[in-house]
Amino acid sequence: MMEFMYSIPSVVNFGNGASQKVGEMVLGFGAKKVYCVYDMGVQKIAKEIVQTLKESGLTVVEYDGVLPNPPDTIVEEAAKTAKEANVDVLVAVGGGSSMDCAKAINILLTNPSPINQYDGLNLVKNPTKPLIAIPTTSGTGSEVTGFTIITDTTRLKKMVIGGQFVGATVALADPLLTVGLPPAVTAATGMDALTHAVEAYVSKGASIPTDVNALKAIALIAENLVEATNNGSNVEARTNMLLGSMMAGFAFNSAVLGLVHSIAHPLSVHCGLPHGVANACGLPYVMEYNAEVVPDKTIDIGAAMGLELQGLTKEAAVKKVIDAVKDLSEKVKIPTLKEAGVKKEQFDRIAEDALQEISTLFNPREASKEDILDILEKAY
Ligand SMILES: NC(=O)c1ccc[n+]([C@@H]2O[C@H](COP(=O)([O-])OP(=O)(O)OC[C@H]3O[C@@H](n4cnc5c(N)ncnc54)[C@H](O)[C@@H]3O)[C@@H](O)[C@H]2O)c1
Ligand SMILES: [Fe+2]
């Protein structure tokens, strides 16, 4: 019997200049006052969006204090301001950190504080306000997922808050906004997107709709990541990367993720690694580990990457796929865990925490603490 769950929370407007529709979109919700959430790294882009909103006759309240791997403390602070200002719509401009921050703020506008009580799936009970997500990285897919990832600063853990009221209502995906993304951020966020697609494809929650999106995302990212990193002004490569990261979001929103993300979250919390770097470091080694139970799917991933695998034994084909992922990582200059500043003394805590992550439940191969320690050693 075929049985699956598939959903996408957001209406998508994709294309060059799509972000300019923001005023018309907000007015469509009958709103007057907008809360615009962003981080200082995207200030220039955000100010242009704010200007467009003002030209549409809207009142804009700005929050520019988003931090990477956003902590719960800033969500509480920003939600308080938004509540006091009595805003009707939220607009998020930035990467996953800004979009996730806005999603979490939005939860607190119609649900009681603190945000920490919603860690898990479907714990947000009250409908939220309209939220327009404008991504400026091609990585997280947060513009189309029903998840927000917020760091719990007391428990030292990245919370995964998911459910029907969490996602953005509208995604304005404008490739032109990603043109100025620096090479290192392009590389790391692109490897995050690739990880989403790979993990969704081999996930225990995968289905035909998630597979189709995952494989297309893998193809787009494998073909365009090096070019987007080395030649950021190539709009075609930027377009394909934004499409790829978004399609990976279409896949993992329903299929969920796996052990790469389970390890990446504690790496960010305890060692400060950017999310994409943390994923990229572990990806080939988790793929190698999982290939024992999903060799055919691993080979499918390689075929989607454009590798010539015909005539090879299963073992040789799997090795070629893993090597290609390592090669891609090296080409875009992803550091090793050691180069990223991780200390071996931190491995034990990282492995312990990874076992508790929700994505671990969806990984195709059941992992022990020793397995995770072994993966960390290989990625060092
Ligand atoms: N909600 C989800 O479904 C989901 C999925 C995966 C990851 N995440 C979360 O998203 C966060 C990571 O997001 P991210 O990887 O997009 O990074 P980010 O949002 O932290 O941004 C990284 C850096 O890039 C800068 N930047 C962004 N766009 C730019 C642009 N166009 N030009 C110049 N600089 C730009 C930012 O200012 C920031 O300094 C993590 O917290 C991660 O856990 C969420
Ligand atoms: Fe991710």
Image (tube, grey):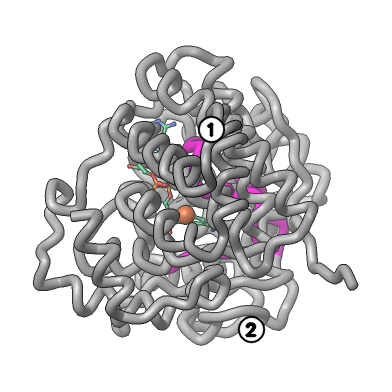
97 with respect to 282 (left or right)? right
**The residue at label 2 has a CB less than 8 Å from ligand 1:** no
Seen from the viewer's position, the closer of residues 257 and 298 is: 298
Start and end of the magenta stretch? Answer: 129-150
- CB under 8 Å between callouts 2 and 1? no
In the picture shown, does residue 355 fall above or below 88? below
What amino acid is labelled 2 in the image?
A: Leu
Q: Tag count in the figure?
A: 2
Q: Which residue is mark 2?
A: 123
Question: Is residue 319 among the parts visible in the rendering?
Answer: yes
The vertical placement of 24 against 96, above or below, is: above
Measured along the vertical axis of the image, is residue 300 above or below residue 180?
below
Quarter of the rendering occupied by the N terminus? bottom right
Residue 232 within the magenta-colored segment of the rendering: no
Ranked by sequence position, the earlier of labels 2 and 1 is: 2
- Residue bearing the label numbered 1: 221
Residue at the right extreme, as displayed: 1
